[in-house]
Amino acid sequence: MSTHRQYELVYIVPGETAEQPLADLQSQVEAIVARFSGTVDKVENWGRRKLAYEIGPHKEGVYVLLVFSGPGDLVKEIDRRLKVIDLVIRHLIVRVDEEIEVADRRQARRKADTARRRVARGLPPEPEERAAGAPGEPNHEQTEV
């Protein structure tokens, strides 16, 4: 039984890499994801940035983020392939679906605690939104005399 989970892949290629080899690498990764019946959710090219530390002769690199969903075998295959591609300086794959679930549970617990405390003070569970202006800002509506 294989379950689909969500992952983030960030890889770095040399800063002087042209657009075409970068696009070819992107299509290779997407083909691997498609072959393992995964889905690419988001692709972001973060552009050319200075590396935190030199990696060999490289001082700058092009960072690319790819968010995808798929089985664990897909992650192993992408990791194996990116290790042998000379264009990739570094890569990192992180599972993010568990972090999203933890954040959602934490937010739900926080809302429940807030509602419980408000009810204990005799207030409605949800705070009322102000008619004009953001919360915490004074309402400076002018009336005509």
Image (cartoon, rainbow, N blue to C red):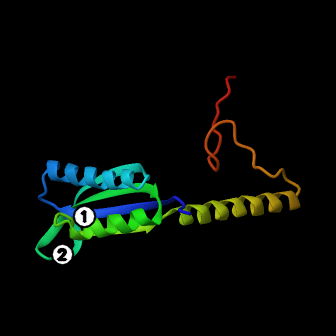
Query: The residue under label 1 is which amino acid type?
Result: Ile
Q: Residue at x 14, y 70 (%)?
A: 58
Which of 92 and 79 lies nearest the eye of the viewer?
79
Give the quarter of the figure containing the N terminus. bottom right
Secondary structure beneath dot 2 equals strand
- Quick check: marks 2 and 1 in contact, CB under 8 Å? yes
Relative side of 1 to 87, left or right: right
Q: Is residue 89 above or below residue 66?
A: below
- What is the quadrant of residue 139 in the picture? top right
Q: Which mark is residue 12?
A: 1
The 10 Å Cα crowd at callout 1, few under 14, some 14 to 19, many 20 or more, is many
Q: Residue at x 52, y 58 (%)?
A: 4
Q: Residue furthest front?
A: 1
Residue that badge 2 annotates: 55
Which of 135 and 141 lies nearest the eye of the viewer?
135
The 10 Å Cα crowd at callout 2, few under 14, some 14 to 19, many 20 or more, is few
Of labels 2 and 1, earlier in sequence is 1
Q: Is residue 2 above or below residue 31?
A: below
Q: Position of residue 75 (x, y in %)?
A: 40, 65
Secondary structure beneath dot 1 equals strand
Give the quarter of the figure containing the C terminus. top right
Q: Is residue 83 above or below residue 124?
A: below
Which of 73 and 122 lies nearest the eye of the viewer?
73
Which of 27 and 35 lies nearest the eye of the viewer?
35
The residues tagged by marks 2 and 1 sit, at their Cα atoms, a distance apart of 10 Å
Q: Position of residue 32 (x, y in %)?
A: 33, 56
Q: Position of residue 18 (x, y in %)?
A: 12, 52
Query: The residue under label 2 is which amino acid type?
Result: Ile
